[in-house]
Amino acid sequence: MNKKAIKAIIICGALVMSIVTVTIYATSGQTSGGSGGGRIAGTWNVRVDITNCQNGAVIRSFDSVGSFHQGGTMIDSTSGIRQELKTPGHGVWSHTSGNRYSFRFKSFSFDPAGTYTGYTIIQHEADLDASGDEYSSEGTAEIYTPNGALVGTGCSATTATRFSL
């Protein structure tokens, strides 16, 4: 074998090992049946209730869609705010125990003229049902100015069903 062929074999071997490593990392949170792990991964139809933080009374409701990706990232889009006034929410999630998960995401806000007005961070604790096809969650929203000053907080609750074929 010449040096060129040996170099090609080494590069191919390194590429295969990289693919195997990425695949193992991406699927490490999955479980086969049972509870926990990556069972929340997937896309969800979400009903959001904005609630009074003191007594839990529903102030208003709207639909959203959220996707939890293997590896711990997520994205959220909502019908609760006109899309030209905010970006989708990008965030992270983790399995905390049993069928319980935490997630947190951030979106940027704009006024009708398109001027950046700040950002919102939503944080929730979710409980996945035994089937893995529904969850409910509760949490908070923190609203910030562009320079990071907290200007408001709120509460919300959700119910969600898995979006599937």
Image (cartoon, rainbow, N blue to C red):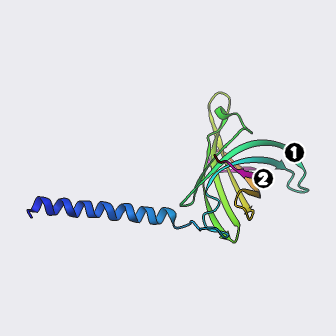
Residue 142 seen in the figure: no
Residue marked by disc 1: 59
Query: For residue 162: magenta?
Result: yes
Residue marked by disc 2: 159
Q: Is residue 56 left or right of residue 149?
A: right
* Residue lying farthest to the left in this orientation: 2
Q: Residue at x 63, y 62 (%)?
A: 39
In the picture shown, does residue 117 fall above or below 24?
above
How many circles with numbers are drawn on the protein? 2
Q: Amino acid at mark 2?
A: Thr
Task: Name the spot of residue 83 as percent of width and height, x first.
Answer: 66, 34
Residue 98 seen in the figure: yes
Q: Is residue 90 left or right of residue 126?
A: left
Residue 20 is marked as none
Closer to the camera in the image, 90 or 141:
90
Closer to the camera in the image, 108 or 76:
76
Q: Residue at x 60, y 53 (%)?
A: 74
Secondary structure beneath dot 1 equals: strand
Task: Name the spot of residue 137 as percent of width and height, x first.
Answer: 76, 58
Q: Amino acid at mark 1?
A: Ile
**Circle 2 residues within 10 Å: few <14, some 14–19, many ≥20:** some
Closer to the camera in the image, 146 or 92:
92
Q: Is residue 60 left or right of residue 103?
A: right
Query: For residue 125: magenta?
Result: no
Secondary structure beneath dot 2 equals: strand
Question: Which one is in front in this view, the residue at disc 1 or the one at disc 2?
Answer: 2
Closer to the camera in the image, 63 or 82:
63
Give, as a single range, the part of the protein colored magenta. Answer: 146-163
